[in-house]
Amino acid sequence: MKIAFTAKGTKWDSMMDPRFGRTKFILIYDEEKDELTTFDNRSIEGEAHGAGPKTAQKLFELNPDILITGNGPGGNAATVLEKTGMEIYIGAGETTIKEAFQAYKKDGLKKF
Amino acid sequence: MKIAIASGKGGTGKTTLSTNLAAYLAEHEEVVLVDLDVEEPNSGLFIKGDLVHTEEKFKMTPEWIEDKCSLCGICQEVCNFHALIQLGTQIMVFPELCHGCYACSELCPTNALPMTPKKMGNLKHFQIGNLSFVESRLDIGEEQAVPLISQTQKYIEKHFQKNTIKLFDSPPGTSCPVIEATKDANFVILVTEPTPFGLHDLSLAVDTIRELKKNFGVVINRFGIGNNDVIDYCKKEKIPILAKIPNSRKAAELYSHGALIYNEIPEIKQQLENIKNYILKLGERGRR
């Protein structure tokens, strides 16, 4: 399973980014390889419009099975993510990546 | 003569000034009042006239034709607003994000993105004596005010004489809709209230209007509350204060009933007279 997180940093103990479209980083944890890779999304700060669909498009390319985020994607981004078929879990905006992952494993997050 | 009435801060009295000034000027002049606050037009609460014309307004957005598309990706590269994105073998279009610039449509090598009309709102034109009143209203769910503001101004351009006094009741704030509503004006009236909040947002509005290189002046509404900082600021910045509309409970009561206030409160009528003289002088100077 590949699991994506919206994050403010690039480490397991970095904080989650509660925002979807304007998240600073996207972290992908590959469970089989036990490997955490990062994707820098900070260029989105310069975009006045359409951050949601743009970030959703990146996720489409990264193609994880699961997305864990905070507030949840907005309407436009959700339309894109729907096409990808990935499962989305929300409500992990105020924790570290590690805590968000543990909460997901314990079924502690809300499905979007 | 085009005069935009703007403010920075919301609730300072743009509509109160616009409607009263329009009605007052229309006692002797040909006037059209245009409500460009298309997200929440409310001049119509105070100006009642006969509906003479109504039309639906459309904005143009691209529609993706799958069979024609070569999936080259040019469209998503040229779109500044990410209103269309490529997902594998599919192009998704988000009409709400589209600014109708035609770039994707024009640059598509296979004509797979024809622009098609999408309804965004309605325009209504009323008449009462010398006063014409035009308001546009954005449909619920539409996110962009600018295309409707722009089309409303085109309507005014087409249907009114050059010497008609045109008053544009603008949206609050300092973002794109305000710029669209004020950019063609010969003069901008910034309405403020004499409070710290009023001054803060006035200074933002002044920065915006200066950036647009517009001639402008300030009207202080609810004069008598707050402090003197707005006056000091205008002095320091050499901004003319066209009028000080006194704070008045009676004005608020009339307003709450959807009535015009200037005929009931002589002090306010006097302030409108000051603005009128200023505007008419500007008009003369413009003709010379």
Image (spheres, coloured by chain):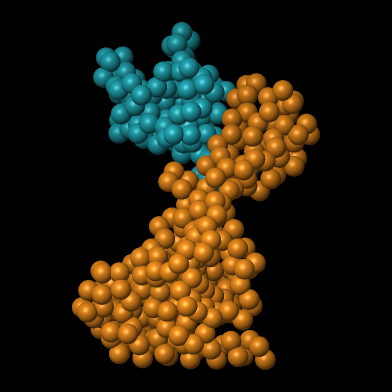
Chain colours: A cyan, B orange
Tally of numbered tags: 0
Q: Residue furthest top?
A: A32
Query: Could you tell whether B281 is left or right of B286 in the image?
Result: left
Image spot of residue B158 (x, y percent): 65, 67
Determine if residue A43 is in view.
no
Q: Quadrant location of the C terminus of chain A?
A: top left
Q: Is residue B102 above or below residue B262?
A: above
Q: Nearer the viewer, residue B68 or B139?
A: B139
On the picture, is B128 further left or further right than B285? left
Residue A54 visible, this angle? yes
Relative to B76, is B13 above or below?
Answer: below
Question: As drawn, which residue projects farthest toward the right?
Answer: B109
Q: Position of residue B173 (x, y in %)?
A: 43, 63
Residue B171 in picture, x, y percent from top left: 45, 63
Q: In the visual, does B126 lie left or right of B76?
A: left
The residue under the point 75% across, 40% down is: B107
Residue A23 percent coordinates (x, y):
45, 36
Residue B242 or residue B43, whichever sits in front: B43
B29 vs A79: above or below: below
Q: Is residue B155 above or below residue A48?
A: below
For image coordinates 63% across by 24% down, the residue present is B90
The residue closer to the viewer here, B288 or A97, is: B288
Residue B83: name its quadrant.
top right
Residue drawn at x 35%, y 65% as measured from the top left: B45
Location of the N terminus of chain A (image quadrant): top left
The part of the image, by quadrant, that contains residue B50 is bottom left
